[in-house]
Image (tube, rainbow, N blue to C red):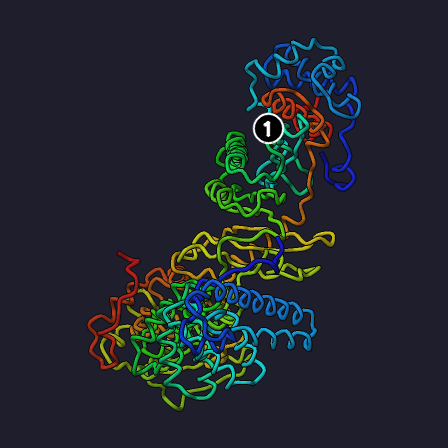
Amino acid sequence: MALSDPTDKLDKPTAPMAQEELDALERSLSGLVGGYLTRTRTLAGAVYGLLRAPEGPVRTPQIASAAGVPEHALRRVLDEIDLDEAALRHELVRGLPAHELRALTIETAWIEITPGENGKWRQIISLHAHGEERVLPIGWAVLDVPLPPGSPVRGVVELEIRAVSALVAQAARDYQAQEGSKFGTAARVPVVIRDPAFGPDRALRSALGRLTSEYWIGVNGNDKLEEPLEHEPYEPLEVPASVAELFAPVPSVSIPEPREIRAGTARQGREYLTAGRRDGVAHYGITRPFVASEPGVPLARRPQRRAVKLTELALDLRDTRAAHRLRLTDLRHPKTVGARRLALVASLLEPMRAGVAQVTP
Amino acid sequence: MNADTTIERCPGAAMPARDSNTEVNDGIGTLRQGDRELFEILAVEREHEARLRMRRQRRLARAGDELAAAREAELAQGVSTPALTPDIELELAARDASLGRREEAQRRYEAVLNVLEASTPLGATAAFRLAHLLLEQRQHRNAVDLLERALHGADTSLRPHIEFALAGELDSVRYRGRVQELYEAALLSDHPDLAPGAAVVLGALRESDGDLAMAAHFYELAIRSEHPVHGVDALARLNALMHGRAIQAIGDAMRCVPWPRDTNTVEASERDAARVSHESSPCCQLCSTHAHGHDGHQASSSRQFTLSVPMYGLRTSGVELANASFLLGAITDALALARCELALVTGSLWDGGPWSSALDRRQPGVAAWGKVFDGCDCGHGHGSGRMLRSTDS
């Protein structure tokens, strides 16, 4: 998907597939996941059916009907058979080489599967590769949770963190598999989670810190940071009531000086609280910049400078809303594995249309 | 979360003192033992109000409404006490100091120090700020005592500030070891501004001691930190050091090989170069050996050399590392006349430094020079010089 006009394309649903595109996708899938005709036809048909379904929730029978494939076959292909998902992901990764990567972003979307007090919720987590000119979804995770978004239940949060970590680690492996040693030189790709839903959770930051050298995680303005900040001797000593109060008022043009989060007694693995404005709205985040330095050489203001750059990058990136565009938020497939596989196959469509993936016919 | 309803006790804050003076000050009066609960409630209310007022004061000051901010500060003063809200007291004291009310600020800091020991983080902050006030009043000794006390309770944010301030106030000759120790601690703290600053000061201290290799090392640390102020300062100092040493070396070389006055000429050229032609008059066997062009330096021993005039000036502005290459050219010429003298200087400067590679590039036989002066007894100190890197081994 070209990003020449991102504001238009990212906000609109993906256009339904034409018959020729269905055939092309089927042929491409045949090359990726094996030469089983029925399997590839069913998979391509699932995407075709999902995008052609009328507005509102889309269930498996509707998709099967629109695609002209038997419902039981569709369920079997999506939920049961051994499908080479890695091959699909590698194809996606090939659409945006590592040296073109600006960042990897995580987005989340929520669906209320079963409404009501005892309802069930589904969380769709997607990992996107952002380049200068295009952005591609390269990994998906689907979680069924018994609680609505933002529930401060430790178990749910840990599940989300594991899913996010797994996606990032998977992306690194996929790029490594595709590019081998070449990926090593481009491996310093920041991970950006603009959605402040995760909050200043330390567990997520620790998990990402083990996987990537740089990250930027959005936080809400009214979040309160549990860890102290490094401060100057003449600053007010009262702990600020919220993140927003630290930066108020956030400048409209520039990025204010990031605030270093104190980590024990040493200034190692520094993290910074940052803020910035985009489209008039203030955004806040916690970032860990990477600065190469020789032993003994003071880091000085280099981490702050890098933190500002990362904040500018995070504010510059657009939300791709891929789950909405590909109508995955309308999908009511009962099993998470099927929903994930369908998301992965549907992700091939846009690169194929843009001609950036080799799945073009 | 409503910020205004959040009540927090500052980590360093003590519970309200039980002595009668404090109670009278708090406006609570004499309370019986059974009124303890009421006392606690009143204390919490006062603390809450003091914080609320100061929060408002900050917001109003940020918005530019100075009058309203001053009113809120006064209201905060009415309810804040050192025992209950020491952090608010520190803020009020800083405000007093910035408004020129030094006595009032000093009184507040001292009151906080009476309640909290300097070994607590808040007490250390009070001591540090009070020391600054005292320094303004030239009460040097008291200020140093306070800084020493503050050092015990300072947290990781405040500690490098205290170390830097204390090192700056101590006599760097009398307490050289302690001063270096404090600056080294500030350097190790990796504070964004103070660590590179400490590296520059340490470099200057080592330079004044004559330890040029370590001076260059510390300047390089500051340069590599890329600090916008201290990095540039260190670069200028390092260049000045290089120029100074080069000039001294050339001067020494010329003393080693005296110039006949009648043949000394200076020609004007585009680069104001001084071409000096002279007859060598070796003062020792080594110089003589060199002057006669032994060990393959025939071209350099032609008894003529060219030096660029700007080299004589200590140009500290706009000097860049690239100049080192040019400098090396000039030094090499001079080196051809008195290599032992220069090797003595450059050996300590370049051994392992950023110029060693440049030197190696220019002079493959660099270590040979080192060997030549070892054992020289001409009186110019050649024999005691350090060897350059053994690149020819």
Position of A109 relative to B117 (above/below): above
Image height check: is A304 above or below A73?
A: below
User: Disc 1 residue type?
Assistant: Val
In the visual, does A59 lie left or right of A142?
right
Q: What residue is shown with label 1?
A: A142
Q: Is residue A214 left or right of residue B166?
A: right
Towards the viewer: B281 or B47: B47
Q: Which of A338 and B287 is in front in this view?
A: A338
Residue occupying image coordinates x 65% and y 9%? A72
In the image, taking residue A187 as reference, residue A245 lies left or right, namely right
Q: Which chain carries label 1?
A: A
User: Which element type, helix, strand or loop, lies under badge 1?
Assistant: strand
Residue at point 25% right, 82% down? B283
Taking the spot 32% from the left edge, 61% from the top edge, the residue there is: B365
Query: In this orientation, which residue lies closer to the viewer: A166 or B118?
Result: B118
Q: Can residue B195 be seen in this view?
A: no
Q: Position of residue B86 (x, y in %)?
A: 48, 71
- Residue B174 spot, x, y in % from top left: 29, 83
